[in-house]
Amino acid sequence: MIPPANNTREAVVILHGVAINTRFTARLARLIAAAGYEVHNLDYPSRSVALADLGPHWLASKLGELGLERAPRLHFVTHSMGGLIVRGLLAAHRPANLGRVVTIAPPHQGSAISDRLRQLPIIWSIIGRNLGALGTGPDAYWRTLPQRADFELGVIAGSFAINPLGWFFLEGTSDGTVAETSTRLAGMADHITLHSNHTLILFRRRTALQAIAFLRTGRFSR
């Protein structure tokens, strides 16, 4: 059971990407907690619950359960699909104590990899029901969201594509899953690119330090 917020420190909610879990974001959570934040590294049903429901319903309910509306400030640090979940939450139920949002390797404008892989039944069995919603087509979830950030958003992208699919299906710089251009969102406060791939970027100390820098100052460290 996740303990409720202590309501004396600024809180950070961490959300992993699709088809992984909190073990992948555990190091990131530890480093952010060591910087003095009250951290909640949340596991959520990324494969079985529709992306359109995860932000407005699942996450909104979890924030209430944890009492995070009483935190001095409420920040979010997300990986991949987690960024779309937070955008969905903010479009429907923006917390009054909203702080800053850091999205790591986010498909803010979808991923062409999802467009390609959605034709393969075995990939649906791995990724789950949200595979199609992560693409770039007319049914992509991000198209239903505001196309400009009206909150303090920092984006960390990756630039090392060790995934062969990225070499063939993504144009320009990418992390092997999301093109660098697709990580961008109009109105974002800052953007930085790290030399890492889509998943391993979570384990890099530099990723956590950049996230902490943005949470503290609204800018990344250069």
Image (cartoon, rainbow, N blue to C red):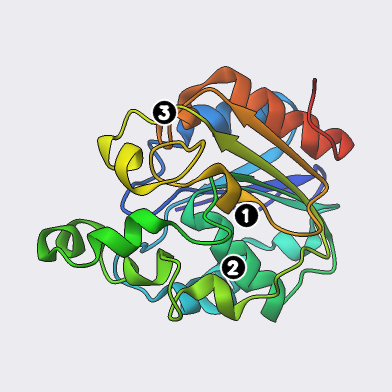
- Mark drawn on residue 200: 3
Quadrant where the C terminus sits is top right
Kindly indicate the quadrant of the structure image that contains residue 31: top right
Q: Amino acid at mark 3?
A: Leu
Question: Mark 3 packing: few (<14 Cα in 10 Å), some, or many (20+)?
Answer: few
Helix, strand or loop under label 2: helix
Q: Is residue 99 left or right of residue 31?
A: right
> Which residue in the structure is indicated by mark 1?
4
Kindly indicate the quadrant of the structure image that contains residue 44: bottom left
Which of the marked residues, 3 or 1, is nearer the chain's N terminus? 1
Circles 1 and 2: CB atoms closer than 8 Å: yes
Q: Residue at x 51, y 36 (%)?
A: 173
Q: Residue at x 61, y 72 (%)?
A: 88
- Residue 180, image x and y in percent? 56, 42
Which of the marked residues, 1 or 2, is nearer the chain's N terminus? 1
Q: Nearer the viewer, residue 37 or 211?
A: 211
Q: Nearer the viewer, residue 77 or 155?
A: 155
Q: Residue at x 47, y 25 (%)?
A: 203
Q: Is residue 128 left or right of residue 13?
A: left
- Residue 78, image x and y in percent? 57, 48
Q: Nearer the viewer, residue 195 or 43?
A: 195
Q: Nearer the viewer, mark 3 or mark 1?
A: 3
